[in-house]
Image: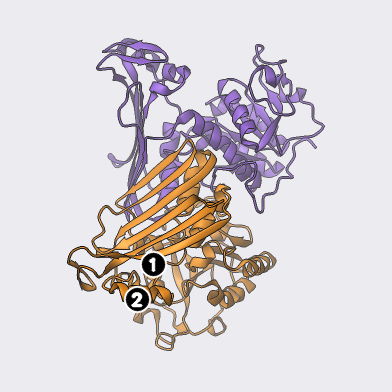
Chain colours: A purple, B orange
């Protein structure tokens, strides 16, 4: 049973902990959260399925009981790589294998080239490993398009869309996409940066880099999806003219021409939810995930499914294109060749 | 420029050589084929795009000019692992990185457990690496389903179909699927083993193994698709009542119940060609490749795209689930971390 250190026990961290324990893949043997409302509590105070160890949440790595060590750490604290960097540095210092939901870590070279180089060098020195993943960014709009290109040559471009009906998603997600806001409120929240899907630019550059498609400029736009009729959801009623959700588009261009286009739509009552990947190549690819993929479940699953891949990877800063393919794992999955002896802090 | 050794310069080998040279990824610096009709010829006698070196095809590895060595070898000689084994042994003995279209190599533990263990041990000893790939087996009905499960937990089963319209495929492929045969001829060709898609069982066991789904029995069936009307194709005219192609089904069962089902259909005039992967898991996956994927192009591409992945892999016998994700590459693709210094026979 893998002993896992969970850093960040907010809403996402708790979902990850419960999914890890349900899966039987590992047990949370240590938990960290600096939030005064959380630290000092037992995991069992915070989640339904707390596992056999039920550690007390401590405020920092320095407060951990270190007698048994960990096989890997999961960091789900922030979308910002700069905000996560002190945690990554400290864990990598112990040679830890880390999976993180930090969106900017999917392709850190976009916004943090120097920090990426520093973390990579540190990991190679200590034997640590670091991977950013998630469902989006992390899979549907970046890893899956790259994997789908395995049968292609002469890739010229790609159009990738993720269209979600947010009606059945959690209320925090519905708030996050601006459902129920007036167009003015929506614009204000976009302007102050509090309303946006983080990671679309990272996905765009991941795709461009790993498909070997050159772009010399990129843009990102964000607009509300306006409700045309009354809508009902967990958040309450949405009136015609209010925002039902968000449409966000990232474009990668070469000489002013669109080469890669990523379109993310998430709205209450959105018809025809799906994911679609079209690659302009020989042969062309037109891949559709019918009905789309439920984001909450998918995020926690891919984090847990990534654990053996990063544990087995050579030291360094990794991406979803450099670790071996992530796949569904379970407590009984045979993992030939898996080396699970990587402990931090023996 | 990667120097590649091509073993097998029959129809598929020639397609691979031309695709490699078109891609700019590598150059065939040595070629082997024991066929007396081929050996002794220059590559330029056999293919349109013969590359800068244009080697003479020799009959065996012992006849190669060894002054510069090779970064990798491509072996496209036989579907049978037993038939390929002497070649693999000899090349692995030099520590070579090998990609092969040998269908049984996709998951060699199904039919050749001891041989697989022997080749793995040899490769680990010499620093060699060995990978079986292709479009099918190799990607559409095995690797892609496993990769698509990255966002899943609790995988309970899978249904995978590949439906191809063979009208525009090469005549040898049309012959291979039995187009134009009477039902009696078709049955005879099935009985003597000369008419079947090789690798469906390997794909089935690849999927079961890497999704961690237990099966305790499996079957494979093969039936003709009977033409209901007159059909035209490269092979000529097909009359109603004759075979238009093949339908092959592999079923993996547990306690008598179907857990995994693979259905392969390839026929002249087949409507709605597509690939579809359904995974019964949380969340469920329903992935469709609209229009399918053209098999000839895809096979040569995935072989070439696999080269950097096997070159970078640790020594041993690999599968498409243990090397880093294969993706479209090109002469200009940046390959960070790629170590290209593996030569055989320096």
CB atoms of marks 1 and 2 within 8 Å = yes
Q: Residue at x 47, y 64 (%)?
A: B199
Find the distance from the CA under tag 1 to the CA under tag 2. 10 Å
Residue A74 position, x and y percent, is 63, 32
Residue A102: give x, y in percent of width and height: 54, 30
Residue A64 in the figure: left or right of residue A244: right
Q: Quarter-wise, where is residue B330 in the image?
A: bottom left
Asked whether B273 or B304 is in front, the reply is B273
Rendered position, B223 above or below A105: below
Q: Identify the subunit bearing mark 1.
A: B
**For the residue carrying disc 1, how many other residues have a C-alpha within 10 Å: few (<14), some (14-19), or many (20+)?**
some
Q: Give the quarter of the image for residue A62.
A: top right
The reply to whether residue B345 is in sight is no
| Residue A182 position within the rendered picture, expressed as x and y whole percent measured from the top left | 32, 10
Q: Residue B21, which numbered label?
A: 1
Q: Which residue is mark 2?
A: B47
Q: Nearer the viewer, residue A50 or A34?
A: A50
Q: Chain of mark 2?
A: B
On the rendered image, what quadrant is the C terminus of chain B found in? bottom right
* Residue B11 left/right relative to B61: left
Is residue A202 visible to the viewer in this orientation of the structure? yes
Image quadrant assignment for residue B338: bottom right
Q: Residue furthest front?
A: B256
């Amino acid at each position: 049973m893998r002993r896992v250190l969970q850093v960040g026990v907010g809403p996402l961290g708790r979902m990850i902990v419960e999914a890890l324990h349900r899966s039987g893949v590992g047990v949370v043997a240590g938990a960290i959260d600096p939030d005064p409302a959380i630290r000092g509590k037992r995991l069992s105070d915070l989640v339904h399925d707390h596992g056999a160890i039920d550690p007390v949440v401590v405020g920092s790595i320095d407060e951990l009981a270190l007698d048994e060590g960990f096989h890997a750490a999961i960091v789900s604290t922030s979308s910002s790589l700069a905000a996560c960097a002190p945690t990554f540095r400290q864990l990598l210092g112990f040679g830890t294998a880390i999976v993180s939901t930090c969106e900017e870590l999917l392709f850190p070279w976009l916004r943090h080239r120097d920090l990426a180089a520093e973390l990579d060098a540190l990991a190679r020195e200590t034997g640590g490993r670091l991977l950013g993943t998630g469902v989006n960014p992390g899979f549907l709009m970046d890893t899956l398009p790259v994997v789908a290109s395995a049968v292609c040559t002469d890739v010229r471009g790609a159009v990738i869309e993720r269209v979600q009906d947010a009606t059945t998603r959690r209320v925090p997600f519905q708030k996050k996409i601006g459902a129920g806001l007036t167009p003015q409120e929506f614009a204000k929240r976009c302007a102050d940066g509090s309303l946006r899907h983080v990671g679309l630019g990272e996905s765009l550059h991941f795709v461009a880099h790993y498909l070997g498609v050159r772009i010399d400029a990129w843009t990102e736009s964000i607009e509300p999806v306006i409700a045309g009729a009354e809508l009902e959801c967990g958040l309450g009623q949405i009136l015609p003219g209010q925002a039902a959700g968000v449409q966000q588009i990232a474009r990668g261009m070469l000489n002013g021409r669109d080469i890669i286009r990523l379109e993310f739509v998430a709205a209450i009552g959105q018809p025809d939810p799906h994911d679609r990947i079209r690659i302009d190549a020989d042969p062309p690819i037109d891949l559709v995930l019918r009905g789309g993929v439920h984001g909450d479940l998918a995020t926690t699953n891919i984090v847990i499914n990534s654990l053996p891949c990063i544990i087995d990877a050579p030291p360094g800063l990794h991406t979803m294109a450099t670790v071996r393919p992530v796949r569904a794992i379970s407590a009984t999955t045979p993992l030939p060749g898996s080396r699970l002896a990587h402990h931090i802090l023996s």
